Amino acid sequence: MLRSSSRNTKLRSRFLPGLILLCFACSLVSVSQAQEIVELKLPNSNKVSIKLMFKNGSISDPEGLEGITQATASIVVQGGTQELSYSAIQDRVYPMAARYGVSSDKEVTTFSFEVHQDHVDEFYPILKGLILTPRFAEEDFNRVMVNQQNFVDQTIRASSDEDYSKKALEDLLFRDTNYQHMKQGSSASVNNINLDEVRTHYQEMFTKTNLIVGIAGNYSDGFLEQLKQDLQQLPDTSPSVPEPGAARMPNGIEVEIVAKQGAFGSVIFTGFPLQLTRADDEFAALMVANSYLGEHRKSYSRLYQKIREARSMNYGDYSYIEWYEGGGRNMLPPSGVPRSSNYFSMWVRPVQIASQLRQQYPELADLEVGHAHFALRMSVKELDVLVEQGLSEEDFEATRDFLLSYTKLYAQTPSSRLGYLMDSRFYGREDYLAELDQLLKDLTLEQVNAAIKKHWQVDNMFVTIITDVSEAQALADSLENNLSSPMSYSNVMFEGLSDEIKQEDALVADYPLNVRKVTIVDSADTFK
């Protein structure tokens, strides 16, 4: 039986020292009484990376001011200090090839700084000024808030239906909890935020009592001591951070269709609550199962093979056992987005709608619904098969061996290595990647299949579908009435299909989905 994080201290203490030497030979960890310090000493590096992780994210946004944490963090890095304006800072850092920014999520906000070791002393006063004495000037506030308002009013609906579907699913999964709203907030709440509230939010929520300090690269002990001493100037109050909201369990399959004018196709995102995170040893077992089912951007997975490779329906079909930041642009899961509330999801990237297919192929002139219903059925059916049958020994060994190599690519730079070390602390671990390596090596097929049975099911899930207004009602009727949804091919492609695929298509077309509720939402009414 795999142990949870609360019961695995002895296990980690036994194998962790050797693994740290193997995986991160130069990493050190020290903790001062005043603040937690995560060190990654790299004497051969020519850079210094610093990360300041505040355990304060969008769940701390006050009611009516959703988006204020994101706004506050953005103004800090896109504004000036008491001594320097934003433009003056840019003029100074450009010759140093230094960079800095911020990542805000549900539960943490992380400021990241990176500079060549030769410029540390010159760059440090800028870092210090941004964090300790941010200017919070009116012009910087106005610039940042215009962009954030544009995002919640327009960008999220217009730029990427794929991201839109993911945000829509979280809105549905976490409805009426502090996890529901986007970190950018809503149209109304962003409009409510003023500069005085931003200043107050920074003083009350970004304090030294909820801070983890990370540093990596070739730095001196004296520099670290100076950093620690200066950060003591942050407020010493303990912010009131609420408990994270938990994902809701749907009653059957509940579908929310977002009808959008001019949608490129139908994008599907499905999910249901998952009662484990990286804090649990059992997470490693589910990583193997998930990689087999739908590893992000990997063509060997079942979803990819069934939907894209065999049927050429779209360009990507993946599954996830935790939030994957920037899935459309990142090949590897980034650090800096640890979460306590978790869920399983499957992502079917755009499939064609009926109007597109009718226009392309005269033989499909009578088609009323595009590929979305079939693709959803195919995805859920593949999950169902995995729950019922589990992995074979051969698939288990191949997938586990892949992950043993692949997870070592997660942290290729000093900054990403430091980020994963800091995320480890969020989950109550010392070094997640090092521990994961041993957990994967110790896994058995029986443990993986047991984890699948325990945590995955197909009867209860939320589904969000971003689709064109011309498709919404017909798709809703098809789902709600559990109508047959045969796969639609051009004549040329159908003639080239194997008998095996044709037979499988017939089974998928009538695969029963436990749909209990279907709602159509106008795109203009989302994230208000």
Image: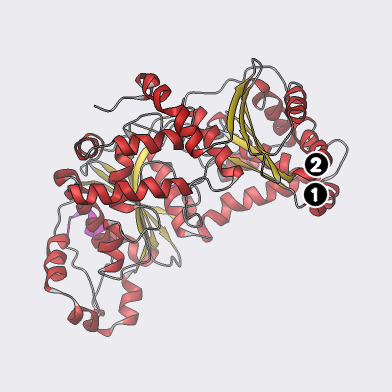
For numbered disc 2, what is the local secondary structure? helix
Work out whether 387 lies above or below 491: above
User: Disc 2 or 1, which lies upstream in sequence?
Assistant: 1
**Outermost residue, right direction?**
83
For numbered disc 1, what is the local secondary structure? helix
Residue drawn at 39 percent across, 33 percent down: 277
Type of amino acid at the residue the image marks with label 2: Phe
Q: Is residue 482 magenta?
A: yes
Q: Tell me the magenta residue range.
A: 476-483
Type of amino acid at the residue the image marks with label 1: Val
**Outermost residue, top direction?**
33
> Residue 366, percent across and down?
23, 77
Tag 1: Cα neighbours inside 10 Å, few (<14), some, or many (≥20)?
A: some
Q: Quadrant of residue 342?
A: top left
> Which sits in the foreground, 70 or 181?
70
Residue drawn at 61 percent across, 37 percent down: 110
Left or right: 316, with 409 as reference point? left
> Residue 82, percent across and down?
85, 35
Q: Which residue is mark 2?
A: 123
Left or right: 430, with 265 as reference point? right
Residue 230 visible in this rendered orientation of the protein: yes
The colour scheme is secondary structure
> Which sits in the foreground, 87 or 92?
92
Q: Which residue is mark 1?
A: 93
> Residue 503, percent across and down?
11, 67
Left or right: 354, with 278 as reference point? left
Q: Are marks 2 and 1 in contact (CB under 8 Å)?
A: yes
Residue drawn at 85 percent across, 44 percent down: 85
Tag 2: Cα neighbours inside 10 Å, few (<14), some, or many (≥20)?
A: many
Q: Mostly what secondary structure, the magenta segment?
A: helix
Left or right: 441, with 225 as reference point? left
> Residue 127, percent across and down?
76, 37
